[in-house]
């Protein structure tokens, strides 16, 4: 695998940090997750194939342990607010002096500097001040599928961006979610420009071509309470959509913000089940596809053909992406128990057994002996 032989130290967090570590692990890197004491098992749900070391940061010896651990690592993933790692003498200036080749990746919400830098936040907050919310109906109005899509899609590019920075050996790389949100929305910024050939965002949120204002770019409920996604933007695709629904463009022109056409398509989709609509639109250029529930995604014919999901021991997970032809990723689906690998990791780092036992007795580190289930 492409990253075989690389050692990554991932300080436990939620979402982007663990996902970044998972990408690196899926492509061969050895990832050690540093957990806090009394962590709920598998709380991040993205720990597959990683090893877990539990360290209590409040104990004096913790800095010594983690500094030594990072002294021969290739990558460190820091998910904390600015100043947290420095407080424990584990900041870039501390660790990169000990290990100049260490790639120190910081994933922060509002960045390392600025008035919001030490403030708590989540995806919706980062999106809001990066102006993506301008194009959705979050603020004071009903949420739409587009809103939900925009929130969750932010996680993926930011984690990938962090991975790319790491792979490019960007020392002290910093993935800032606000700037990342704005960067991910570059196309939105471009298409709002007056110089862009077609005005995509001239109206209030929810009244434009791509944010719910067009009846031909929307999701619709079916007879069996499932949904179909319609994205028939181009005129030929729109004609194919209407043909499949026994409608005509004379009675249903391709206009934006025409409530009667929204209602007509909604009522028409309610006349058939999702499966019946799939039989009509699959393999056509109508740009109509089923909205597949997460528990059924692996069964969809397209995903099944491409083997887009892995199944093992009752678990179903997406395969690593992008696919590398010469060195494909090979994920391990087993999640580590917090502290399961504490002793093993510390021995590898060069600590002696009596030192490790002393750390355990002082409750600086925690070790959970887990029996193999193989």
Image (spheres, grey):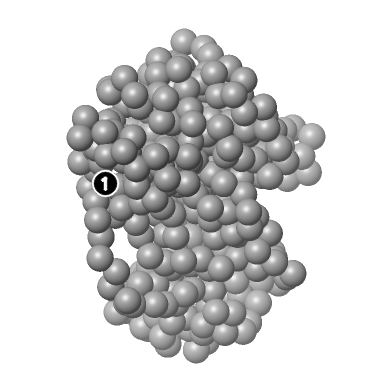
Quarter of the image where one finds residue 184: top right
Q: Residues within 10 Å of mark 1 (few under 14, many from 20)?
A: many
Q: Which type of secondary structure does the marked residue at label 1 adopt?
A: loop
Task: State whether residue 160 is above or below residue 70.
Answer: below
Image point (65%, 68%), residue name: 328
- Tell which of 324 and 38 is nearer to you: 38
Task: State whether residue 223 is above or below residue 157.
Answer: below
Where the C terminus falls, by quadrant?
bottom left
Q: Residue 322 location in percent, x, y?
A: 64, 61
- Residue 41 seen in render: no
Q: Is residue 239 left or right of residue 214?
A: right
Q: Residue 314 location in percent, x, y?
A: 32, 77
Q: Residue 228 location in percent, x, y?
A: 44, 71
Image point (42%, 67%), residue name: 333
Quarter of the image where one finds residue 255: bottom right
Q: Residue 196 location in percent, x, y?
A: 76, 39
Quarter of the image where one finds residue 181: top right
Image point (40%, 19%), residue name: 88
- Tell which of 196 and 188 is nearer to you: 188
Where the N terminus falls, by quadrant?
bottom right
Image point (31%, 38%), residue name: 354
Residue position marked by numbered label 1 in the rendering: 367
Q: Which residue ends up furthest to the top in the rendered image?
A: 115
């Amino acid at each position: 695998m492409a990253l075989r032989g690389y050692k990554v130290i991932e300080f436990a967090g939620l979402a982007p940090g663990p996902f970044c570590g998972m990408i690196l692990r899926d492509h061969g890197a050895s990832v050690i997750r540093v957990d806090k004491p009394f962590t709920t098992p598998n709380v991040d749900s993205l720990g597959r194939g990683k090893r877990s070391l539990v360290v209590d940061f409040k104990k004096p010896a913790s800095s010594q342990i983690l500094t030594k651990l990072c002294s021969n690592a290739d990558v460190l993933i820091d998910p904390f607010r600015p100043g947290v790692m420095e407080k424990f003498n584990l900041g870039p200036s501390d660790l990169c002096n000990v290990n100049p080749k260490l790639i120190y990746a910081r994933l922060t919400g509002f960045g390392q500097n600025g008035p919001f830098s030490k403030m708590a936040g989540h995806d919706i907050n980062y999106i809001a001040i990066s102006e993506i919310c301008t194009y959705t109906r979050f603020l004071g109005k009903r949420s739409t599928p587009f809103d939900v899509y925009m929130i969750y899609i932010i996680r993926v590019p930011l984690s990938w961006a962090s991975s790319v920075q790491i792979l490019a050996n960007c020392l002290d790389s910093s993935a800032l979610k606000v700037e990342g949100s704005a960067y991910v929305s570059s196309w939105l910024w471009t298409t709002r420009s007056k110089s862009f050939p077609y005005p995509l965002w001239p109206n209030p949120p929810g009244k434009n071509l791509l944010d719910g204002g067009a009846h031909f770019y929307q999701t619709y409920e079916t007879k069996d309470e499932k949904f179909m996604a319609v994205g028939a933007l181009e005129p030929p695709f729109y004609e194919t959509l209407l043909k499949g629904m026994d409608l005509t463009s004379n009675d249903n022109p391709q206009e934006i913000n025409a409530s009667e056409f929204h209602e007509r398509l909604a009522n028409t989709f309610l006349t058939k089940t999702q499966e019946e609509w799939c039989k009509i639109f699959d393999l056509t250029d109508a740009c109509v596809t089923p909205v597949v529930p997460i528990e059924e995604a692996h069964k969809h014919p397209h995903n099944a053909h491409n083997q887009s999901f892995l199944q093992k021991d009752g678990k179903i997970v997406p395969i690593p992406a992008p696919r590398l032809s010469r060195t494909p990723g090979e994920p391990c689906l087993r999640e580590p128990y917090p502290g399961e690998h504490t002793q093993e990791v510390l021995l590898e780092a060069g600590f002696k057994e009596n030192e490790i036992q002393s750390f355990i007795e002082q409750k600086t580190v925690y070790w959970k002996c887990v029996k193999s289930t193989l």
